[in-house]
Amino acid sequence: MKPFKALLVATLVGASAIAAAVPLKTDAARSSVSAVFKQMNVPVEAPFRSFSASIDYDAAKPAASKANVEINTASFDIGDPMYNKEVAKKEWFNSAQFPKASFVSTSIVPGSAGKLNVSGKLTLKGKTADVTFPLAVKAEGGKQVFEGQLPIKRLAFNIGEGEWKDTSMVADEVVIKFRVTAAP
């Protein structure tokens, strides 16, 4: 009887490990991260051209899921090489000292309207803040698509120092928009 119990316990432990969150591989060609802000009251959306996302997702048990995103700050593309060079400088992203921005989830729970509420740590320019945002998850072409928007205040992360603290030129409000497509 003891060998049977040991086999049963091993099977249950193995089954629970299989039921845990599954690491997904990001489809970079179908994924995007961008920042939306107002410059002189005109909306601007600019992408980050280089980022990576590590997502372990279990649709049946979202609380077992986790996410980690790293963004290359020097890859921010405002659409002009001169401006791109400017935002990599110390006053903005300071990409030489802080080449990566990151988000690490601490909690993922079911929310309203079929969305998930994601909480975690956002680190930009050496400053870390607790953030929470809604996340939509849908199946598309055999892949999982994670979409969301995270509003932040750029000045809370010292993005725009010196004369750029003036929010009449570049608004303090920034929305980080993302769409990550991934599959097992």
Image (cartoon, helix red, strand yellow):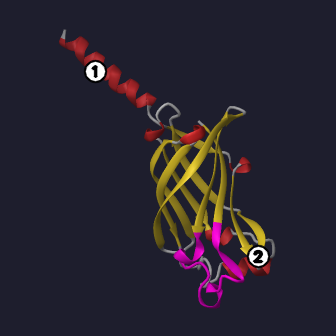
Residue lying furthest front in this view?
112
Which residue is at 73% across, 73% downward?
38
Which residue is at 76% across, 76% downward?
41
The location of residue 168, given as percent across then percent down, is 70, 83
Badge 1 amino acid: Val
Mark 2, residue position? 41
Q: Nearer the viewer, mark 2 or mark 1?
A: 2
The location of residue 11, given as percent across then percent down, is 34, 20
Is residue 168 positioned above or below 182 on the image? below
Disc 1 secondary structure class:
helix
Residue lying furthest bottom in this view?
163
Disc 2 secondary structure class:
loop
Left or right? Give the position of 158 relative to 121.
right
Quarter of the image with the N terminus in it: top left
The boundaries of the magenta stretch are 153-174
Mark 1, residue position? 9
> Is 168 colored magenta in this rendering?
yes
Q: Nearer the viewer, residue 18 or 92?
A: 92
Which residue is at 72% across, 80% downward?
85
For the residues labelled 2 and 1, the Cα–Cα distance comes to 62 Å
The quarter of the displayed image where residue 162 is located: bottom right
Q: Nearer the viewer, residue 34 or 109?
A: 109
Which residue is at 50% across, 35% downward?
58
Residue lying furthest top in this view?
1
